[in-house]
Amino acid sequence: MAEAEEGIEELSITAPLGFRAAVTRSGLKKAGDDLALIYSERPATAAAVFTRNLVQAAPVVLSREHMRRPRHRAILVNSGCANACTGDDGLADAQRSAMLTAALLGCDVREVLVASTGVIGVRLDMEKLSAGIERAAALMSREAGARVAEAIMTTDTRPKRAIARLRVGGRTVTIAGVAKGAGMIHPDMATLLGFITTDAAIGKRALQTALRRAVNTTFNRISVDGDTSTNDTVFALANGAAGNRIILDSSSKDFERFAGGLEDVAKSLAVEVARDGEGAGKLITIRVRRAPSLRDAHKIAATVATSPLVKTAIAGSDANWGRILAAAGRSKAHFDPGMVEIRIGNLVVARRGCGVKFDESEARRILDRSEVDILIDLHQGTAKATEWTCDLTEGYIRINADYRS
Amino acid sequence: MAEAEEGIEELSITAPLGFRAAVTRSGLKKAGDDLALIYSERPATAAAVFTRNLVQAAPVVLSREHMRRPRHRAILVNSGCANACTGDDGLADAQRSAMLTAALLGCDVREVLVASTGVIGVRLDMEKLSAGIERAAALMSREAGARVAEAIMTTDTRPKRAIARLRVGGRTVTIAGVAKGAGMIHPDMATLLGFITTDAAIGKRALQTALRRAVNTTFNRISVDGDTSTNDTVFALANGAAGNRIILDSSSKDFERFAGGLEDVAKSLAVEVARDGEGAGKLITIRVRRAPSLRDAHKIAATVATSPLVKTAIAGSDANWGRILAAAGRSKAHFDPGMVEIRIGNLVVARRGCGVKFDESEARRILDRSEVDILIDLHQGTAKATEWTCDLTEGYIRINADYRS
């Protein structure tokens, strides 16, 4: 269970046994810490999910290559510069930063995974970054783990942390995660960076299966603006320090329990990313029920979640359900619009594809809340899907109209 | 050639011979005229293109049915209420309005085409509408044609009109058009209504071919917000009053000339719709060149044109070309990002997928203009595509956050 009510220390990315971290300011971001290092004291199993954008940032290209190694030791991440669309020079920069980190930590360069977020098309300032990496490597501690979530923020207004503790293979296992999001967020990954640490003992293939499954139902189900980033990355590091029976079989009970905990952490982070979308005032949950197929359910949920007209209507607390049905209608899902029921919170606003009389002031009360649930019940099957998004406000425009300067 | 510089009278929808029109206020819209009737004095050939949204408004369902007739006499259009998601009752309302119009004009009900635009999910006020139709039928004149473009506006800030005159089959033929757009605008048609009249003599199949072709390269290549409406409709009425040799063969020179004129009118209207997108300050033209295939070119142009991050950056005159390349990268087109060149106006900002040094103040000067051209030159083929859109501003949010009230 993700326990968001715990204190910051309890939610630290170093809460699992055998992890240390460091954060520092290298000067790549306008203000605040912009460099984080996550380190496993023992060789760890790693899993990764990357952006499906054809344009892949240098750290994505490099980390994908490094993922071929069986074991990893560290994740180096910077905010303020995405190191994307920087060509061979950018790739060399990413490589140099991994090499420096490996040298300082005494491990192989391919045991270092890297991630970047920030402006696209600008080279890393290697002088600042190298000085930052040297400082970070000297500063590593268990305590610093609590500050990693802040150091990876760009336009995020709040750090995102989550943790789960569960009994697996005779031991208590901890799974901790941090994420950043805010803009360029869309299924197929977001400018989303997510880092998950765990002291569970788990094989590399099983960890990858669990991470892929968790991402598909969580990070790949959130949308802020429909734009997919060049840098999206989720890493999981599992170092086995908990001493549980190693999880190798992805059909075992231990695997199911671990995968459930990982999904809880990922879901908690993903929902927080949607809630903290650029300029957002409201978290919107779009639930599609009784759809003819899973594919149709997903298409409808994703299209409604990315509709600017739906998202602006909710920003204005306007129960404009016609826009919801119109978005579903252009989703390319196959369904009969004449059977659709729509609810805003518990309030039925449309039935059999037509509007019903409803209390507008009650609708406004529901829409004025910071969490808005939209239910689209197709009444024509058993498939369902959920997608999280946020309202679209003038704040989004202000943030994005002049991001670089 | 569309001649936007002509006076309003010269651009009237009744400029072609043998057309009359009427506009009136029925009270469906908050203010101003909201009802228009376009009438051909003689039976006309009609062509139509409708929304591909699965949710189709009642007037779309009815007009699709009426299009089976060989000849038509009138187009009835109201703004203020879309008559969409209104079920069987809404369809009956659309039918009653067509029947009343036919009775007043003395034609068959199926010779009347109908279109509506406005709020979704609300029934037409038939008492107001019927009174409006009766007034309109009594008011028909050639002069009123100049005011049709205003009467169909919703959140549009300007009426859209275009005209072309050309020699076809030994006679001068006139093609006139009006359109409305503003929001819910996306390829596959927009909440776009477009009405085109011509005095050309042309067969029904040839007219449909010409209209479909014109829509594909114009109205289907504009985007304001990625939302596709339930009501999108473009009608063309050709009444033969010019007395040209009838155009029947779509491989003839006469057809090519006529189709070119129709495309010019449609393009002029479509570009004006994009320029007048909700809250827009700038018309943005996205040109993709040297793409591996037409399909890839279109995917890239359409994805860049709908990217909120690209559109907000241009609103802020920020030469954030990385967002353009990132949007191309998620378009699902197949291409090598490492060969891409990007220009903003004449300024090269990226080459071989990487940023180049450019004069930021020059970029800002270009982006501050009311028309911004983006060129994405893939350097890997011969296919090309153009898409028109507008910048995304706080004005869009203000307009859409509370549209119904």
Image: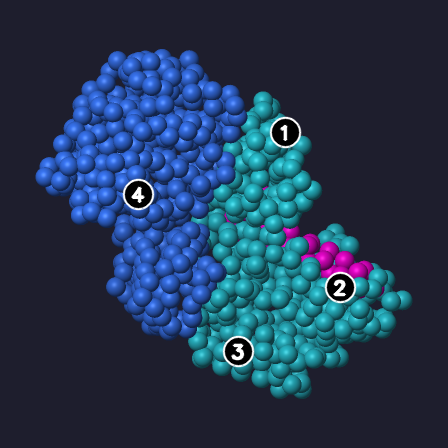
Chain colours: A cyan, B blue
Q: Amino acid at mark 1?
A: Val
Marks 3 and 1 sit apart, C-alpha to C-alpha, by 53 Å
Q: Amino acid at mark 2?
A: Ile
**Dominant secondary structure (helix, strand or loop) of the stretch shown in magenta:** helix
Question: Image point 69% across, 60% down: which residue?
Answer: A213
Question: Image point 24% across, 32% down: which residue?
Answer: B238
Which of the marked residues, 2 or 3, is nearer the chain's N terminus?
Answer: 3
Question: For the N terminus of chain B, which image quadrant?
Answer: top left
Magenta-colored span: A254-282
Q: Is residue A195 left or right of residue A165?
A: left
- Residue sitting farthest toward the left: B170
Q: Position of residue B6 (x, y in %)?
A: 15, 37
Q: Is residue A306 left or right of residue A375?
A: left
Q: Amino acid at mark 3?
A: Ala
Disc 1 crowd, CA 10 A, few/some/many (<14, 14-19, 20+)? some
Are callouts 3 and 4 both on one chain?
no
Marks 4 and 2 sit apart, C-alpha to C-alpha, by 61 Å
Q: Which residue is mark 4?
A: B209
The residue marked by circle 1 belongs to what chain? A
Which of the marked residues, 3 or 1, is nearer the chain's N terminus?
Answer: 3
As rendered, which of A255 and B108 lies closer to the eye? Answer: B108
Q: Which residue is mark 2?
A: A175
Q: Position of residue A390 (x, y in %)?
A: 56, 46
Q: Which residue is mark 3?
A: A94
Of tags 4 and 2, which is closer to the observer?
A: 4
Q: Secondary structure at mark 4?
A: helix
The residue marked by circle 2 belongs to what chain? A
Q: Amino acid at mark 4?
A: Thr
The residue marked by circle 4 belongs to what chain? B
- Circles 3 and 1, Cβ within 8 Å, touching? The answer is no
Q: Secondary structure at mark 2?
A: strand
Picture quadrant where residue B129 is located? top left
